[in-house]
Amino acid sequence: MEQSEGIITRLTKLTDTSLIVHWFTAEDGLIKTVAKGARRPKSPFAGRLDLFFDAQLQWARSRGELHTLREVTPGRLRAAIRGNYPSTLLAAYFCRLLEHAVERDHPEPELHDLLRRALDHVDEAGASQRALDHFEKELARLLGLSSPRQAAETVLREALGGLPPQRETFLATFAPGRSFPFPDGDSRRS
């Protein structure tokens, strides 16, 4: 049995009752686990698996890339991110960008810390162009790609063969003066 501290970066339906949970862990890097029965109402995983959660997880390693999730103890839930569409887009972009930048099952503790800090910031302060720029700059620096002559976005785009589409969606949604509905029916401007 393996134990890790991880951040949920993606959830994918596997069957009517099970999920694939994508994690970015401090100890093992990017991993994918199957949460068997997680979609059942009385599942031991009920309320413990959602995007951007920090959690302690126990999992059984398999020979392939899909491991079995045994137990989850949530830490920071980051509910404010999921309650705000631009924040959700920005957080999803951070997660997908890291998935493009690192190999599976390879520990990257500095990148895990960068993601944790970025998600905490977006959860507390909301989405911003400044947060996007800072994340890209720090990621380029940690990957050894930063250049004084080029923007981090350009360097990352060239090195990774493109950037995830969530970036453009975020920028279009976050355009100054654009309004978007909140769950309480209120409309707020960025």
Image: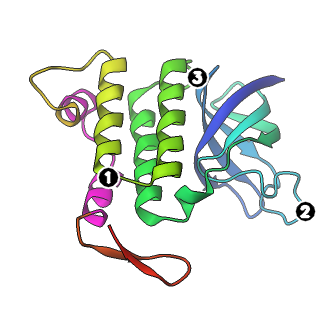
Give residue 105's mark: 3
Q: Residue furthest bottom?
A: 185
Quadrant (top left, top right, bottom left, bottom right) of the N terminus: top right
**What is the crowding at mark 2: few (fewer than 14 residues within 10 Å), some, or many (at least 20)?**
few
Q: Compared to 157, does 108 lie above or below?
A: above
Give residue 165's mark: 1
Q: Residue furthest front?
A: 125
Instruction: Return the residue at label 2.
Output: 42
Question: According to the image, what is the colour scheme of the structure?
Answer: rainbow
The three-letter code of the residue at mark 1 reads Pro
Residue at 49% x, 64% y: name it: 84
Residue 16 forms part of the magenta stretch:
no
Q: Earlier in the sequence, mark 1 or mark 3?
A: 3
Residue at 55% x, 60% y: name it: 82
The three-letter code of the residue at mark 2 reads Lys
Residue 169 forms part of the magenta stretch:
yes
Mark 1 → mark 3, Cα distance in angstroms: 24 Å
The three-letter code of the residue at mark 3 reads Asp
**What is the crowding at mark 1: few (fewer than 14 residues within 10 Å), some, or many (at least 20)?**
few
